[in-house]
Image (spheres, rainbow, N blue to C red):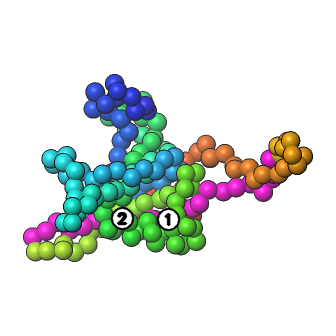
């Protein structure tokens, strides 16, 4: 699926990761990560904090095995938006459990909607609760050799190519895949 002007004009582009029902999950390899200004869902206006600073959210692109017939040429790419305190806390917890310093492209991420929390105010909407698991990218121990003019042969670690087969088929409320 491309992100060209024609996709934008037709209302297409990369589909978002959706969590409609308790137990919905997504998993895949991280292919891109960006920070963007948070926008109001209804007005599409940029959101700010009370002090005037812009509200930001993380957009994490995942290569998944999910396909949706509503999207022409769907290749399984999904954008996960980290735009709530609950998603952020779940991601930080997953990073800590993986003993990683942060997420990286080539890593694997699994996210599951586990249910609703308590509204922060009477009449408010209940926040969605999530759990996540993260697995950092793997590196092969085999060195890649390159010729250096000054020192002769150098050995540098070689990164293993991303897996060609994303995970799939997880059932609701299952344990993380790793």
Query: x and y percent of residue 170 in the render?
Result: 47, 56
The secondary structure making up most of the magenta span is strand
| Residue at the extreme top of the image, as rendered | 6
Q: Is residue 152 left or right of residue 36?
A: right
Q: Secondary structure at mark 1?
A: strand
Mark nearer the N terminus (1 vs 2): 2
Give whichever of 70, 138 is nearer the camera: 138
- In the image, 33 versus 164, the foreground residue is 33
Residue 138 magenta-highlighted? yes
Pointer 1 residue: 133
Q: Which residues are magenta?
A: 123-144
Q: Which mark is residue 105?
A: none
Task: Mark 1 vs mark 2: give the one in front.
Answer: 2
Residue at 49% from the left image edge and 65% from the top image edge: 133
* Residue 78 visible from this viewpoint: yes
Which residue appears at 33% of the width and 68% of the height? 86
Q: Residue at x 18, y 74 (%)?
A: 120
Q: Position of residue 23 (x, y in %)?
A: 36, 62
Which quarter shows the C terminus? Answer: bottom right
**Distance of label 1 from label 2 (alpha carbons):** 12 Å
Is residue 59 rendered to the left or right of residue 32? left
For the residue carrying disc 1, how many other residues have a C-alpha within 10 Å: few (<14), some (14-19), or many (20+)?
many
Q: Measuring from the top left, give residue 106's x and y in whole percent.
A: 58, 51
Q: Which residue is mark 2?
A: 87
- Count of residue discs: 2
């Amino acid at each position: 699926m491309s992100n060209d002007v024609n996709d934008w004009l037709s209302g297409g582009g990369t589909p978002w990761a959706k969590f409609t029902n308790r137990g919905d999950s997504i998993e895949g390899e991280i292919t891109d990560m960006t920070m963007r200004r948070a926008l109001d869902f209804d007005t599409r206006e940029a959101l700010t904090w009370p002090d005037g600073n812009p509200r930001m959210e993380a957009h994490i692109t995942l290569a998944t095995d999910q396909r949706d017939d509503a999207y022409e040429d769907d290749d399984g790419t999904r954008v996960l938006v980290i735009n709530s305190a609950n998603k952020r806390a779940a991601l930080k917890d997953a990073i800590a459990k993986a003993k990683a310093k942060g997420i990286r492209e080539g890593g694997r991420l699994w996210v599951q909607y586990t249910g609703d929390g308590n509204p922060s105010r009477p009449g408010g909407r209940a926040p969605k609760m999530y759990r996540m698991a993260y697995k950092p990218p793997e590196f092969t121990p085999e060195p890649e050799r390159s010729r250096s003019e000054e020192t002769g042969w150098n050995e540098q670690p070689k990164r293993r190519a991303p897996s060609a087969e994303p995970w799939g088929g997880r059932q609701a409320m299952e344990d993380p895949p790793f």
